[in-house]
Image: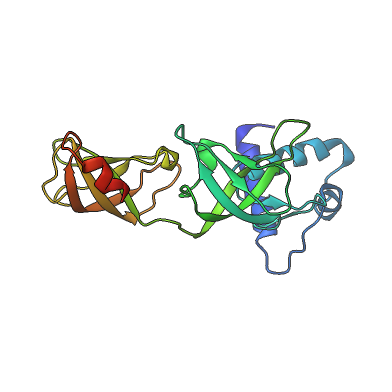
């Protein structure tokens, strides 16, 4: 299957799944519906796997393909300093691992809806992607301010946030590199975009006595 054929077939499957009358179905059922010969069903699976990897369709526990949220479950996202995270789901023995490029705009403590893309085996955790954030846990971040020429960043004290906060020009209250600041998030960003915010308070310089205590309080 060429790249062009893959693109065309992905578009066809996506159009089918998005039809209002579409009912989630297994690979075999979809192959029969689309008149795909038995010898070409592996190619159909390749197309479906590509759409799953892109998060454009979902798959239920019974192996039926449908919209992205067909097999969605809800849990609490725990971030890691390296960018990836884990989602704790009630009723599951293990957390679900979320790779860095599949965290969407989730941040530590958020309530999220995820799709499990691969079930775990043995000690290996299940792996999934964040479909959407249902509730953000925090809208304010305390951290170290780093000023660049026309913008700046807040490096959060809480390393589990795992993302620096972009501060546009004119939104830093005059903070300089080394200041401990409070920032209010205006945009939670995404997998390819940093969160954005505005500085609302300067707590002091990191070298000033008591600044760390104030930030904790």
User: Residue 19 or 107: which is nearer the viewer?
Assistant: 107
Q: Is residue 35 above or below residue 147?
A: below
Instruction: Single out the residue that lies furthest toward the right.
Output: 38
Instruction: Single out the residue that lies furthest toward the left.
Output: 174
Q: Which residue is pictured at 70% across the width and 42% down the height?
A: 94
Is residue 167 visible in this depiction of the protein?
A: no
Q: Quadrant of the N terminus?
A: top right
User: Residue 3 or 80: which is nearer the viewer?
Assistant: 80
Q: Which residue is pictured at 25% across the width and 51% down the height?
A: 182
In the rendered structure, the answer to whether residue 11 lies left or right of residue 149 reads right
User: Residue 9 or 52: which is nearer the viewer?
Assistant: 52
Q: Which residue is pictured at 61% across the width and 33% down the height?
A: 3
Q: How many marks?
A: 0
Q: Position of residue 200 (x, y in %)?
A: 21, 56
In the rendered structure, the answer to whether residue 160 lies left or right of residue 88 reads left
Q: Position of residue 21 (x, y in %)?
A: 73, 69
């Amino acid at each position: 299957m060429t790249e062009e054929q893959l693109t065309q077939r992905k578009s066809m499957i996506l159009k089918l799944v998005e039809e209002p009358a579409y009912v989630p179905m297994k690979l075999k059922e979809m192959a029969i519906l689309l008149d795909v010969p038995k010898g070409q069903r592996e190619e159909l699976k390749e197309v479906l796997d590509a759409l799953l990897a892109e998060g454009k369709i979902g798959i239920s526990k019974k192996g039926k393909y449908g919209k992205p949220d067909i097999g969605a479950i809800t849990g609490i996202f725990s971030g890691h300093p390296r960018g990836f995270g884990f989602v704790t789901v009630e009723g599951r023995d293990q957390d679900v691992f979320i790779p860095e490029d599949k965290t969407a705009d989730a941040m530590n403590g958020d309530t999220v809806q995820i799709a499990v893309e691969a079930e775990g085996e043995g000690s290996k955790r299940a792996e999934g992607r964040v479909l959407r954030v249902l509730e953000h846990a925090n809208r304010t971040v305390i951290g170290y301010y780093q000023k660049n020429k026309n913008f700046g960043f807040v490096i959060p004290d809480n390393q589990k946030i795992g993302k620096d906060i972009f501060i546009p020009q004119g939104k830093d209250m005059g903070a300089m590199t080394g200041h401990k600041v409070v920032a209010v998030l205006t945009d939670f960003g995404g997998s390819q975009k940093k969160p954005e915010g505005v500085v609302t308070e300067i707590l002091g310089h990191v070298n000033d006595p008591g600044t760390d205590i104030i930030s904790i309080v």
